[in-house]
Amino acid sequence: IGYNLYTMDLKDLLSTALQKRSSSLIEPHDQALRLFNGFYEGFPDLVVDVYARTLLLYDYSNSTQTRESFIRAAQIFYLQQLPWLTCVVQKVRLSVDLEQRRGRVTWGGPPARKIREAGVMYALDLLINQDASFYLDTRNLRTWIREHSADQRVLNTFAYTGSLGVAARAGGANRVVQTDLNHRFLNLAKDSCSLNGYSVQKSDYLAGDFFRVTGGLRRHGEQFDLVIADPPYFSSTSGGRVEMAVESERLLNKLRPLVADNGWLVAVNNALFLSGADYLAVLERLGSDGYLSVEGIIPVSEDITGYLPDQSIQLPVDPAPFNHPTKIAILKIRRKV
């Protein structure tokens, strides 16, 4: 990715970014927000999130010496500017050490176990994986799901820790089925439901390979009014392979039979090297039979895309008409009578 590195002092960059987001940092400090996106805001070695009162520092540096200086500087800066913080976690994203990628507490503790978004509580485990167990870039999608899930049957595939499915429960869905390969991640989805007082039906949490689980749902004639596909960039199991840069069409075709007539299919593609135009072309090709149409695009919120100091940053490919490499499309499905 082409950047003008270190064009400003890091403290100045962090300060500018924090000022842009200051109106969102309100009591009781139980929200989640990206405080600094260095890939867009001038320092690609660093990304900073806050989850409730826990600061999360993502280190993307290849240099141990560089890392020690800028990570320490960032931690000092935020502890001075945000005195309500109670914990700092650092994750070294390019480390060969799994534990460093998952993160460690470097100040205070313990890490936050829950956050609130638009009145909905979500359980966290900030050290369970190399990410934070909760994706900030799908915040606007959770809003859309809450607004469109009343009385609906919802299937959330590649659910991870289930935030999109929990948003559907918050929106009044009749039934939400969540499926992921890892039962530990689905347990966080159950915790989120419990935090909000929603009942937990164990039969609606399906731990297993996507291809086998969805195949079983198809064989049993299951249909849903809203189906969500937010797969990882790449995954390979004995049941099949997911590679979102080149195979999103095949994956979506696996899900179309599960969508009821006039239902929704939410398609998320986070492949950095797949352009927005190419992704739309895939979706339009899927709709060439007249039974699928692109009904809308969900943008990624500005704390993720960054408050750009200038417009010179170039991504590997242009995500337009999407505003971020996390490309979110809302598809309408019609079935042959």
Image (cartoon, rainbow, N blue to C red):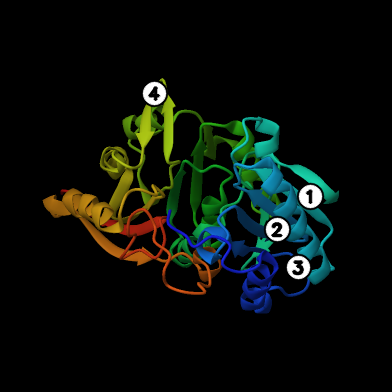
Extreme residue in the left direction:
289
Residue 129 sits above or below residue 320 on the image: above
Residue drawn 81% across the image and 64% down it = 79
Q: Which residue is mark 2?
A: 51
Residue 10 sits above or below residue 288 on the image: below
Q: Secondary structure at mark 4?
A: loop
1 and 4 marks in contact (CB < 8 Å): no
Query: Is 129 in front, or is 1?
Result: 1
Which of the two discs, 1 and 4, labels the residue nearer the N terminus?
Answer: 1
Q: CA distance from mark 3 to mark 1?
A: 14 Å
Q: Secondary structure at mark 3?
A: loop
Within 10 angstroms of label 1, few (less than 14), some, or many (20 or more) residues? many
Q: CA distance from mark 4 to mark 2?
A: 35 Å
Q: Is residue 128 visible?
A: no
Q: CA distance from mark 2 to mark 1?
A: 9 Å
Which of the two discs, 3 and 1, labels the residue nearer the N terminus?
Answer: 3
* Residue 208 point in image, percent of width and height: 49, 28
> Label 1 amino acid?
Pro
Which of the two discs, 2 and 3, labels the residue nearer the N terminus?
Answer: 3
Q: Nearer the viewer, mark 3 or mark 4?
A: 3
Residue drawn 42% across the image and 66% down it = 299
Residue drawn 57% across the image and 32% down it = 182
* Residue 194 point in image, percent of width and height: 69, 50
Q: Secondary structure at mark 1?
A: loop
